[in-house]
Amino acid sequence: MAKTSYFQGKLGLDYLAKKEKNLKVAMDLLSKSPGRSSLYLQFDDGDLKKYKGAYRIKNNPKNLSYVKEITADLVTKKGITLDKTNTKDGDQYFFTVNGVSFAIALSGRALSNVTLESGKAQAAGTPTTAQQEDGFIVNLNAGKLLELKEISHKVGYDFDDSWYHSYTESFKAFTSKIISQRDLDKYIFYRDSDNKKLDFLNKITDEKILPSKKDNWNPADLWAVRKSKIEELKKEVGVLYDKMRNDKNISIEQLNKYIETKLKNLDIVGVSLKKVEGRKANLDLIKADAKFFKAIVLQRITKKFPMDVTLSYFDLYITYKCFKSENVEYYYRFRPRAKSGELGQSAEGAPVTQKNFDGAVAKQQVLDVYLKQGSDISKLLKKTKMPKTNVADGIAKLDKSYNDFKKFVVKNKYDFAIVKGLTTTLNDEYKVKRGILNLFYLYLVETYKNRQELFRKFYMAAKKMNEFSSIHYKIYG
């Protein structure tokens, strides 16, 4: 389905006049009309496409009297004719000028993805993940960094300046450290979530042959494929894919090695993308293997977090040593996610200097495996009536199977946090439950016997790596 966007008033009319010189007189007349701000030039998938052979201009909000008045003015101009074959009175009006056609269509629906006459994007929600990724990929396929308006119209979403900053810095990082700008035309770029990408890319990420979830194996958001190698890659991946599906003795390491070899040759390159909100983009080559995992060492707890159990989250601040690099200060944020009333715990991790999170600590693969009792208390809280008073009263209501947790809370000696708010009056059952949930997860972390193992797994999960991860680049900032 086409992604539709619009240029309002003079911005769109001038754009079309420049695109089609035969339409300049008609566009100038529309641009000078008192209702020009209700006219919107339509783009589909970022391009000026034709509807029934005509460029489309939407009239919104719908104003039939204005459209009839402007139609009468247009046909008085030499060379502009009303195409009565396609015109439907009260709905759409087609005009032809020296063989070039445009239509004014009355639209009763609110328009989205609009760039106003001022050049600014009309207020809108957050772009989807696919739109965010496409906003970067269209530049690579174009072979250059496009202007903000052009990116917006190719994607069908009006990005603001913060996204353009991200695309600018990401493009610089990509072309300076992965594939040079002069070589971009040798490649074709695909969003991983696009089902229309090359079939062999679907095969190497098929969960039928992977030992874990796809995003835990390779979190590539985009794939760069060398055009001259496509046929060769199809054959090689086809053979490897069939072997892995039919022979249990074929190891995932063979797939990892294949991806690594192709990345070194720059034949297939996987890239993970994060919005760049800092001054410039960072770029890392992520390669997970046994040597890497062993080199992730928990050095110390960086500081205690002032945890107020009446609030929605708590943080764990720790310092890692990775290989021979300087220490990395990192933190994890635990909180129930999604809609209000949610009592399923989640966690995300990031360096303390980074504005956005690296990624989530996978619930099924990590939290539910290493902090098993967390899911139990989530289920219990969902089905149990709790007092509205405060978190301490809620903890007291838990049955004897939670006595160790109760004793730990009473002891009030935590390595990772300074806990407060236990007796703060809430008058809210959900907040009481949320406070119990967060405090119980802190207890599980505090009492886990092998912290090195636990925080190594946390780090790997936040970085989207595990024992089966393939090599890829990551752009972030």
Image (cartoon, helix red, strand yellow):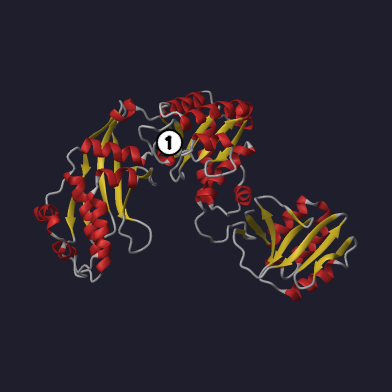
Q: Residue at x 65, y 51 (%)?
A: 45
Front-lying residue, 204 or 349: 204
| Residue at the outermost front position | 246
Q: Can you say whether 404 is above or below 144 in the image?
A: below
Q: Residue at x 51, y 53 (%)?
A: 128
Res. 300 visible in picture: no
- Mark 1 surroundings within 10 Å by alpha-carbon count, few (fewer than 14), some (14 through 19), many (20 or more): some
Picture quadrant where residue 357 is located: top left
Q: Can you say whether 114 is above or below 247 in the image?
A: below
Picture quadrant where residue 137 is located: top right
Picture quadrant where residue 266 is located: top right
Quadrant assignment for the C terminus: top left
Instruction: Give how far across and how far down residue 353 sits, in percent.
Output: 34, 42
Left or right: residue 42 compared with residue 362: right
Instruction: Give how far across and how far down residue 65 sits, in percent.
Output: 75, 76
Front-lying residue, 420 or 92: 92
Front-lying residue, 367 or 401: 401
Residue type marked 1:
Leu
Left or right: residue 14 compared with residue 244: right
| Residue at the outermost right position | 78
Q: Residue at x 63, y 54 (%)?
A: 1
Q: Secondary structure at mark 1?
A: loop
Say which residue label 1 marks.
210
